[in-house]
Amino acid sequence: MTAEGAGTVATKTGPTIRRMQLGQELRRLRQNALRDDGEGNGMTLAQAVKGLGFTESKLYRVENGLTGLPKVQDLKELLDRYGVTDPDDVDFLLEVHKSSLHRGWWSPYRSLMPSGFGMSVGLEGDAKILRAYQPDRMFGLFQTEAYARAQFEIAKPIDERTTEFVERNVEIRMRRKEAILRSDRPVEVHAVLEEAAVRRVYGSSEVMREQYAHLAELVGLDHVTVQILPMSQPVYRSADNFILMEFDPPLPRVVSIDTLDTVSLTGKDTELWRYARRFEAMAAGASAPRETPGFLEQLAREMEPR
């Protein structure tokens, strides 16, 4: 690695992205490092951490961007073990490490989020492209404030949640929307929504009409594509709602899978292929994007007072 080459990493600088960048580079350095036994290049995780102050599992999580490496000294010792001595390279990676430890906007809300959701939120805002499937409600980045609040309010007495919990989660939902509404490099979104998810009423007819009007505005944006999967069609439907995330090179793709109260993230090729096939199958079975505005107008008319 050279300082010039290192400087070509993705231009977005959110802390979650930086953690992924650092992990990816540390994995590459480990796989290219000279082994102490002289038996060729490439260290195992065990060889890399031998004598250092952290475990194989810790390094695995760091390499996969799942956790940070809080101590600067740990990073310096790893770089020394990998034979990285060029001052520019070391300084660059130390700077990436420093920015990876910054708190994202979602950090104050972490205690309110399901397991794994914080990292997913951090990544979706820095992604280049999101391909999402939502089977049971409006996709989170498309929701209006009233629609989001209605969801949390109806569950509040059942799940024994506080008013603060409701309001803070609505805040999270609205902050997430900024990824597609910002003027500077908004995230490109292609979403497949179940017809049942779009029809399901939250709040009132007024809330739903506002939601339909808002979604109609979003699909008018060049970077937002929405397809509806008709209830009447016998096509493939995924059991999970998920988001496939693509980033500026050289960062790898990941998939965020939402299952009940847990959000899991993976970059394994087998899982990426599986969910990509699922998305492609559902997009092929869904109505064409050009039909979405008319469908939303129809739904809004159905919600008008009689």
Image (tube, rainbow, N blue to C red):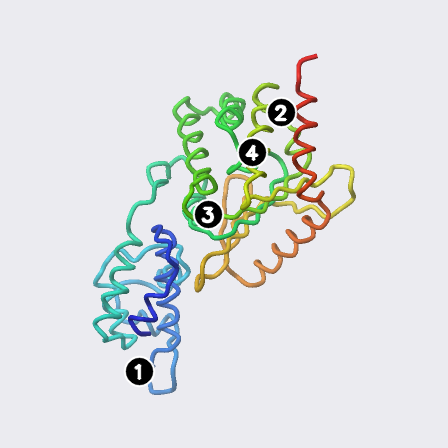
The N terminus lies in which quarter of the figure? bottom left
> Mark 4 or mark 2: which is in front?
4
Q: Are marks 1 and 4 in contact (CB under 8 Å)?
A: no
Q: Looking at the picture, which amino acid does disc 1 mark?
A: Asp
Q: Residue at x 44, y 26 (%)?
A: 166
> Mark 4 or mark 3: which is in front?
4
Q: CA distance from mark 4 to mark 3?
A: 21 Å
Q: Report x, y in % for residue 22.
A: 34, 62
Residue highlighted by disc 2? 201
Q: Looking at the picture, which amino acid does disc 4 mark?
A: Glu
The C terminus lies in which quarter of the figure? top right
Q: Report x, y in % for residue 280.
A: 66, 53
Q: Earlier in the sequence, mark 3 or mark 2?
A: 3
Nearer to the camera, 19 or 163: 19
Q: Earlier in the sequence, mark 3 or mark 1?
A: 1
Q: Residue at x 28, y 69 (%)?
A: 78
> In the figure, residue 29 lies in which quadrant?
bottom left
Residue highlighted by disc 3? 124
Q: Which disc, if any, is residue 206?
A: none
Q: CA distance from mark 2 to mark 1?
A: 64 Å
> In the figure, residue 168 lies in which quadrant?
top left
Q: Is residue 42 above or below residue 192?
A: below
Q: CA distance from mark 1 to mark 4?
A: 60 Å
Q: Residue at x 33, y 85 (%)?
A: 37
Q: Which disc, if any, is residue 217?
A: 4
Residue highlighted by disc 1? 36
Q: Looking at the picture, which amino acid does disc 2 mark?
A: Val
Q: Looking at the picture, which amino acid does disc 3 mark?
A: Glu
Q: Are marks 4 and 3 in contact (CB under 8 Å)?
A: no
Q: Report x, y in % for residue 294.
A: 69, 33
Helix, strand or loop at label 2? It is: loop
